Image (cartoon, rainbow, N blue to C red):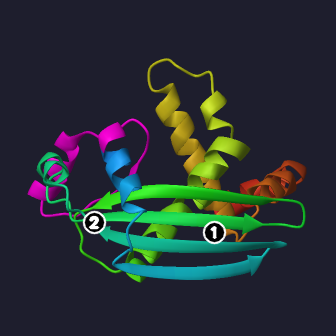
Amino acid sequence: MPKKTVNKIRRSKNHYLIQVKGNQPLLYQDIHSKTQQPPLTTYTEQDHSHGRKVTRTTRIYAVTHARMRNIWTDLQTYIIVERKRQTKNEETNETAYFISDLDWNAEQFHHLVRNHWKIENCLHWVKDVIHKEDKNKIRSANGPICAAVFSTIAINFHRKQQQYSITDGQILFRANVKELFNMIRT
């Protein structure tokens, strides 16, 4: 995320939590170097569902590098989130780095990051995987915007009907188009 956007966020009296990826090498390196030090706070949560065990650990570090504080407006905190996922057949580990202007503890950041991932899993994943939005060949005029709006309407319609499996909802309505039109009219 460009530093100009962070400036605008702070000037508007809002806060930021931004995931850091490899396209910010100095920032990424500074955060990674913090892993050799003890964190300010740590929060761990375990989840046992869908045949897997997931352990999420959130660690918080204060930003001490003056250069980073000058580059990123009001930068206070580095957040490191590790996810370990175990199933019968495999174990995966993933580490995500974040920055924020907030001075929160690990549990508070943990819940903030989880809520962000929930949005990603509930909406964007459906759009990308089920509706294949990334493979859409519509490129002219307002076509991409209209396709995205229709996709969102369809997802919201399924959710309102309490069909949390979008695929199951699509199969149901393909077989019962008349029922779908009756629901839309009411």
Q: Nearer the viewer, residue 14 or 181?
A: 14
Where does residue 166 sit, x and y in percent of width and height? 74, 57
Inspect the image, locate mark 1, and give the three-letter code of the amino acid beneath it.
Lys
Residue 77: numbered disc: 2
Please, what secondary structure does the residue beneath circle 1 have?
helix
Residue 42: mark in rendering: none
Q: Amino acid at mark 2?
A: Thr
Q: Which residue is mark 1?
A: 160
Q: Is residue 7 magenta?
A: yes
Confirm whether residue 164 shows in the render: no
Assign a secondary structure to mark 2: strand
In the displayed structure, does residue 4 sit left or right of residue 171? left
Range drawn in magenta: 1-26
- CA distance separating discs 1 and 2: 38 Å
Q: Any magenta on residue 102? A: no
**Quarter-wise, where is residue 157 in the image?**
bottom right
Asked whether residue 101 appears in the rendered view, the answer is yes
Q: Quadrant of the N terminus?
A: top left
